[in-house]
Image (tube, rainbow, N blue to C red):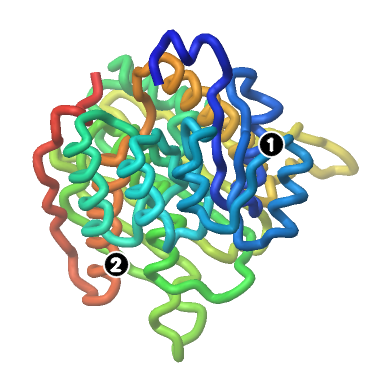
Amino acid sequence: MSNQHASQRRVRIGVIGTGGMGGRHVRNLTNEVAAAQVVALSDVDAARMQEVAAACGAVHTFTDAQALINHPAVDAVLIAAPDRFHAALTRACIDAGKPVLCEKPLALTAAEARAIVEAEVAFGRRLVQVGLMREYDPAHLRVKQLMDSGALGKVLAFRGVHINGGALSWRTVEDVVTNSAVHDLHSARWLMGDEIVRVYTTHVPYSPERPDTARLLLIQFAYRNGAVGQIECNMEAGYGYEVDVKLTGETGSAETNSLQSAVVRHQNQRSQWIEQDWLQRFETAYVHEVRAWVHSLQTGVPTGPSAWDGYVSMLVADACIASARTGQPMDVEIPRTAEMYKRA
């Protein structure tokens, strides 16, 4: 849409998927972003979709996502459908010439993500933003800004910790890497401003009889410019949800402190409440993410994690999965970045 047209009315958005994540995006767009209007929803669960539509005022509802994408009242699309649909739906948005914010992962494999990049490059301009929302988390941003300032010298190491309270069912290595660790892999690239070129993945299964599962996953890696890194993903810690990072430089280090609650001292104890899930931990980040996305649609200047970021994250994820399967370190071959994806 043109800048002049965008300034005359709110950006009309269609949301695909109205579950926990999609419902949160709809609520944020409706209540926190004055420049946005959710006009359309799509979900196979018609009852849930109608409930969300009544709350946000969406006038168009579809059980067919393609119908939402093609509807003339929809200026831009937010995809919060299950992971397996992300690639096809994002490609459909590109084919329709409509901007899209797709929840992570962009695709389930690097090959699928590469096809999206190629389609967007062929289209000629950026339409895709990927929901790697830690770029909008205040705690992560403070670490990023400090390290980019050069105050701590050359960055030598990255450490990430991703802790879940528990899972409803056992999760496979592939699912843990593509659905959870992909966030951490992107953070490792973005915060360090460098590419991961070699990975080694080990894991602890839920049961010896199910070696394909991962209760705890450990990824060690090396960067192109010589730094090292490590990510620990604990899928069933039993006590809550935490995500933190630490960057070590030549003259000091910087780390996040993600707990947002008050520190309570009472009856000879010192305690602090821990968030239950990612929707609580990253509540502010999700608001800032959609606010920045809508602003980019109004100005015509794309920002945030791109399809290229989604693709490279999946290149690293594929290597992590291969390493877990073979028990061997794996190299990551990253092609030259297309011009349209180079950040200032």
Tell me the quadrant of the picture where the C terminus can be found: top left
Which residue type carries mark 2? Ile
Give the image location of residue 228, x and y in percent. 24, 45
Look at 50% across and 24% down and name the residue there. 294
**Few, some or many C-alpha atoms within 10 Å of disc 1 (few <14, some 14-19, many ≥20)?**
some
Label 2 SS: helix
Give the image location of residue 131, x and y in percent. 45, 41
Label 1 SS: helix
Say which quarter of the image contains residue 299.
Answer: top left
Give the image location of residue 35, x and y in percent. 59, 19
Say which quarter of the image contains residue 143.
Answer: top left
Please indicate whether residue 340 sits to the left or right of residue 174 in the image.
left
Please indicate whether residue 167 sits to the left or right of residue 244 in the image.
right
User: Mark 2 — residue?
Assistant: 321
Which residue type carries mark 1? Arg
Give 325 or 43, whichever is nearer the viewer: 43
User: Mark 1 — residue?
Assistant: 27
Extreme residue in the front direction:
72
